C-alpha cells in the first residue's frame, strides 16, 4: 500500500471536506475529545503549510495540523485523524512524527503541547518526548480553550475552571525534544524473528 505523507498546501484544498468528514465521524464514534473543524479552517492550515496530509491514490486518508498560541511560545499538533480503513498500520505514528518535525523546524523554541483522550496518541507523544502535565502548564490563551466547546465534556472543563477534564495534557519542551531524539538514536534496534 503506497501512502504519501507531505506538508499540505493550497493545492490540497480539495481534500478539506473529506478531512472534516473524517473528524466528525471519529468524534461521533468516540463521543469525546475531538474538536470539530470547518472546511475553511482546514484550508487555512494548508495554505499556511501548517498541516501534514496523508494521501492514498490521491484520497485523503490522514491529517494533522499545527496551531500556535501565546505569541508562538506554545505549539499544538492537533486534529490527528486517520481514516478507519487505514488504522492500525502505523499511519498515525508517521503523521504525528511528520507534524512533530515540521513543528520543530518552524517553531524551534516553542513548547509543544497537546490534549488527548486517545491512549495511542499518548503513547506516540511519549515516544516523541512529551510528558503528562496539569492543564495549568498549557497555554492560557482563551482561543485555544474555546475550541473545546464542540466536545461533549466541555462542561467539565468550564466547571473546573480549566484545571481538569477527561483529556490528558502533555508537553514537550525544546530541550526534551533534543534529549528524546538523542535517546532514540542511542537505543539498540531489536529485531523480532
Image (spheres, grey):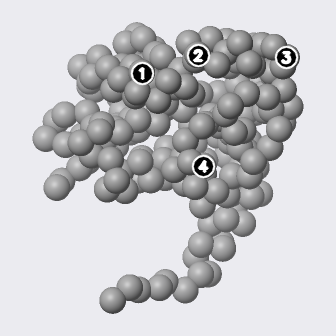
**Residue assigned mark 3:** 161
Q: Position of residue 47 (x, y in %)?
A: 41, 22
**Residue assigned mark 4:** 122
Q: Tell me which numbered mark, 1 or 3, is placed earlier along the sequence.
A: 1
Q: Is residue 78 above or below residue 27?
A: below
Can you tell which of label 4 and label 1 is closer to the viewer? 1
**Label annotation for residue 152:** 2
Q: Is residue 97 above or below residue 150?
A: below
Q: Secondary structure at mark 1?
A: helix
Q: Secondary structure at mark 4?
A: helix
Separation of marks 4 and 1 at Cα, in angstroms: 20 Å
Residue drawn at x 13%, y 41% is 57
Q: Position of residue 164 (x, y in %)?
A: 79, 28
Q: Say whether residue 79 is left or right of residue 187.
A: left
Q: Pick out the residue farthest to the left.
A: 57
**Label annotation for residue 124:** none
Report the quarter where the C terminus lies.
bottom left
Q: Quadrant of residue 179?
A: bottom right
**Residue assigned mark 1:** 28
Separation of marks 1 and 3 at Cα, in angstroms: 25 Å
Taking depth in this image into account, of 123 and 182 the one nearest to the observer is 123
Q: Is residue 145 visible?
A: yes
Separation of marks 4 and 2 at Cα, in angstroms: 20 Å
Separation of marks 2 and 1 at Cα, in angstroms: 10 Å
Question: Counting other residues with Cα less than 10 Å from the Cα at mark 4, is it few (<14), some (14-19), or many (20 or more)?
Answer: many
Question: Counting other residues with Cα less than 10 Å from the Cα at mark 2, is it few (<14), some (14-19), or many (20 or more)?
Answer: some
Residue drawn at x 46%, y 16% is 37
Amino acid at each position: 500500500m503506497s501512502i504519501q505523507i507531505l506538508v499540505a498546501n493550497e493545492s490540497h484544498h480539495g481534500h478539506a471536506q473529506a478531512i472534516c468528514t473524517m473528524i466528525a465521524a471519529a468524534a461521533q464514534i468516540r463521543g469525546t475529545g475531538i474538536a470539530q473543524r470547518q472546511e475553511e479552517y482546514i484550508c487555512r492550515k494548508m495554505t499556511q503549510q501548517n498541516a501534514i496530509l496523508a494521501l492514498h491514490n490521491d484520497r485523503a486518508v490522514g491529517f494533522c495540523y499545527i496551531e500556535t498560541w501565546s505569541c508562538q511560545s506554545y505549539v499544538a499538533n492537533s486534529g490527528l485523524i486517520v481514516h478507519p480503513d487505514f488504522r492500525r498500520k502505523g499511519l498515525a505514528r508517521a503523521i504525528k512524527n511528520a507534524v512533530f518535525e515540521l513543528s520543530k523546524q518552524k517553531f524551534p523554541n516553542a513548547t509543544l503541547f497537546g490534549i488527548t483522550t486517545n491512549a495511542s496518541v499518548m503513547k506516540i507523544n511519549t515516544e516523541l518526548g512529551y510528558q503528562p502535565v496539569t492543564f495549568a502548564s498549557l497555554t492560557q490563551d482563551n482561543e485555544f480553550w474555546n475550541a473545546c466547546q464542540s466536545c461533549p465534556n466541555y462542561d467539565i472543563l468550564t466547571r473546573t475552571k480549566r484545571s481538569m477534564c477527561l483529556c490528558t495534557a502533555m508537553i514537550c519542551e525544546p530541550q526534551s525534544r533534543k534529549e528524546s531524539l538523542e535517546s532514540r538514536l542511542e537505543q539498540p534496534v531489536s529485531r523480532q524473528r
